[in-house]
Image (cartoon, rainbow, N blue to C red):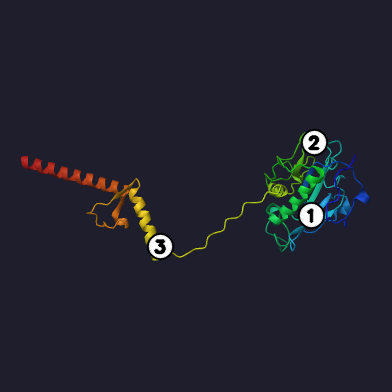
Amino acid sequence: MTKTGAQRYPGASTAYWYQSKLGGSAMESNVGVMHTTEGRTVPSYGGGSSAPNFTALPDFKTKTLRWYQHFDFDVSARALVNKSGGVETNTANAVQVELVGTCDERHASTWDGKKAGVDYIFWPDAPDWALAELGKFVKWAHDEHGIPLRSTVTWKPYKKGQVGGSYGANGVRLTEAQWNAYYGWLGHQHVPENDHGDPGDLNFARVLAHAAGIKPAPEKTQEPDVALTDADVERIATAVWKKLAKADGVYLAPTDDPQYSPKDTDPGHYWSGRTVFADLVRRVRDTQKAVTELVAAQQTKES
């Protein structure tokens, strides 16, 4: 099969080049498979026997990904299980990328004394610069090879040893027919005949946004606290109480109220609807009591 498009990613190192030794099948890649290495350095891949096409190593100092290429873009790699007699995986037009780091929640913050985001990447919480770097590769794969800028699968969290995680029969792994019909980007957790759950719930939507040139909305900055002067407080209070005086449920207080204030900017100038209702109930009860006492007095007088 003819290999079209650029076969080497610009700037990628071929220090770990395995194609010369292991060969591979020529293909036209239209699917991208993401993995995580579950380590903090570029693996040896058993001398290439389980190598992908590319490995991306985070460089925290420069906030870039250092790329290593092991096979041509359109040559089958070896990072997937391919059982005999079943569906093809490595040779099914799938270019494969290993991301150095982890998707294991046990290493979400620290790992053997190392700190996530400083010494290694926990890819489900990858910094945006790393996702942007990955987006550059995805865009290049689209421009040079036509891999669609899309991912229609669900990226599940790894959850090592827990029900509902991405390992094994996870509910998102494709059937043979779905795999053969798929075009776009997915993870190791989606490939049939495989049981691995990497790269967990990688934020691939953000990767695609970077690839498409969509910038995130700017973060809102909090306004600094500014002390109010006495004049500010009085002006605000006056405006609020005048507004309340015109609103439904706010009433002028009776002048015989002990808390009454003739100043229309004071709370004592107004009653809430609750206060008015309570006063009405009190007055009705007082009236009932007075009527009862009058009736009793009249009955005593007549007897």
**In the image, is 270 to the left or to the right of 30?**
left
Question: Which is nearer the N-term, disc 1 or disc 3?
Answer: 1
Q: Residues within 10 Å of mark 1 (few under 14, many from 20)?
A: many
**In the image, is 188 to the left or to the right of 46?**
left
Q: CA distance from mark 1 to mark 3?
A: 57 Å
Q: Residues within 10 Å of mark 3 (few under 14, many from 20)?
A: few
Which quadrant of the figure has residue 47? bottom right
In the displayed structure, 202 sits above or below 193; it is below
Mark number for residue 232? 3
Identify the image quadrant of the N terminus. top right
Which quadrant of the figure has residue 219? bottom right
Identify the image quadrant of the C terminus. top left
Q: Which residue is at the front of the view, 83 or 249?
A: 249
Percent of width and height locating residue 145: 82, 43
* Residue designated by label 1: 56
* Residue designated by label 2: 180
Percent of width and height locating residue 170: 71, 42
Element type at mark 2: helix
Tell me the amino acid under the disc marked 2.
Answer: Asn
Q: CA distance from mark 3 to mark 2?
A: 69 Å
Q: Which residue is at the front of the view, 23 or 303?
A: 23
Does residue 303 appear in this view?
no
Question: Which is nearer the N-term, disc 1 or disc 2?
Answer: 1
Question: Which is nearer the N-term, disc 3 or disc 2?
Answer: 2
Tell me the amino acid under the disc marked 3.
Answer: Asp
